[in-house]
Image (cartoon, rainbow, N blue to C red):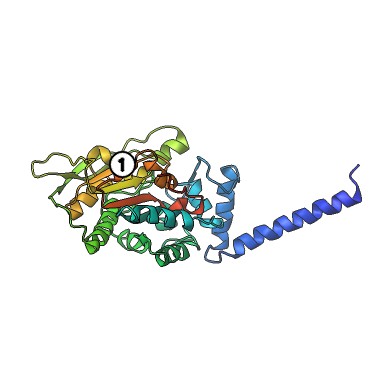
Amino acid sequence: MVSRKCLMVALGLATVAAMLVTAWWSLRPEIPPEVQEQIEDDLEKCGGELKEARCAVNGVDDWIFLQESLVNLVVDWKENLNSFVAFNDSLEVRGIKLVVVPVPDKLQIEAEHYSEELSGGIVAPQYEEWVDALQDEGVVVVDAVEEFLEKNEETPMFEAYESHYTSAGRQLLAQMIADTINEMDLDVPRGEWFLRDTVVPGSGNLYHLKYNSYPDYDVRVLKTVDAEGKRYHGSKDAPIVVIGDSNADFGWNSSSNIGAYIAQATGIKTFTRSRIGGGNLGPTLFKGRSKFLEGKKMVVWVFDGRELYGDFSMPEF
C-alpha cells in the first residue's frame, strides 16, 4: 500500500513538473496558445522527447515539417559559442577566413504552413542573441532570416515535401555570401560561370520520412555551367572550401548546390566537403586532413539553423 509520505512526494513532483512546463511555455509568449498545443501534440506523436528524433509531422495543406524544427523553437539552447570561436581562431592563425552560414529553418520561414495561427515567420527566441554574441566575438555570420522571409513572398524558399531550401533559396543565400566575400577582397583569380534553367525530380525527403515512399514531382532549378554549357564541378585546389551538412551539397547532381552558386556569384572556384547530418560536426571535417587547408583563403560553413539548439563540435586539427 502506498504510504501517505510517498503520495505527498509524488504529488509534489507532479506539481513541480507542471510548473516547469508552464514556465517553459511562458518564456515564449510569441507562440499563440493554440500553436503551443499543436507543438506539444506533435512532439508527443514523435515520442515526446525534447531532442532530435527522425520524425516528420503534418502542417497545413499537405506541408510537412521535421520534429527537430519544433525542438529548436521551444528548448533552451546549449552553450555553443566557444566551439564557433575556437574554429574561427584555428583557421585565422592559418590565414583562412571563416564565414558561418546558418540556413534559415523551414519552420522559421513557412510558419503559416505549419499553423494557420502563424504568419510572417517565427524565430527561436535565442537566435538573434546568438548571432549578436558570435559577431561580438569577431566571427562573420551571414544571417538570412529576414531576406528569406521577404523573398519568400515572391519565390518560395522551401517546398511542401522537402526540408532543404529551394534553388531560389540557395541562390539568395549564395549572393549574400558572395557580398560578404567581395567585401573581404580575397585577391584570387576569378573566372565566369552562368546559370541555366532546367527541371529535375524533386527528392521529397520529408514525404519519404513520413510515408516511407517517394513522391513523383519535378522542381525547377538553375544549374551552374561554364561558357561551353558544361556543369560546374568543384576543384580541390579552389581557394574557397564550403563545408557542412546536406545543405552544403544539396543540388550537387544538377550543379545547383550552394557551392556552385557561390562560384557563379563571385567568379571564385569553390570545393564542397559535406557530411549528411553533419552540420554541427563541421570543424571535424578536417581531422587528419589539415594539409588540405594549405593555400586556402576561406571556409564557408553552411548548416541547418535548426541545429543551433544542440552541441557543436570543437575543431580537431
**Image height of 140 relative to 233, above or below:** below
Q: What x and y, as percent, mark residue 69? A: 48, 51
- Who's the residue at 55% across and 53% down the image? 39
Quadrant occupied by the C terminus: top left
Q: What x and y, as percent, mark residue 196? A: 16, 46
Q: Could you tell me which secondary element the residue under label 1 belongs to?
A: helix
Res. 250 in view:
no
Q: Is residue 122 left or right of residue 77?
A: left
**Image height of 209 relative to 296, above or below:** above
Q: What x and y, as percent, mark residue 294? A: 27, 46
Q: What x and y, as percent, mark residue 10? A: 81, 51
Looking at the rendering, which quadrant does residue 293 occupy? Answer: top left
Q: What kind of residue is marked 1?
A: Lys
- Mark 1, residue position: 291
> Of 33 and 180, which appears nearest the observer?
180
- Who's the residue at 46% across and 53% down the image? 83
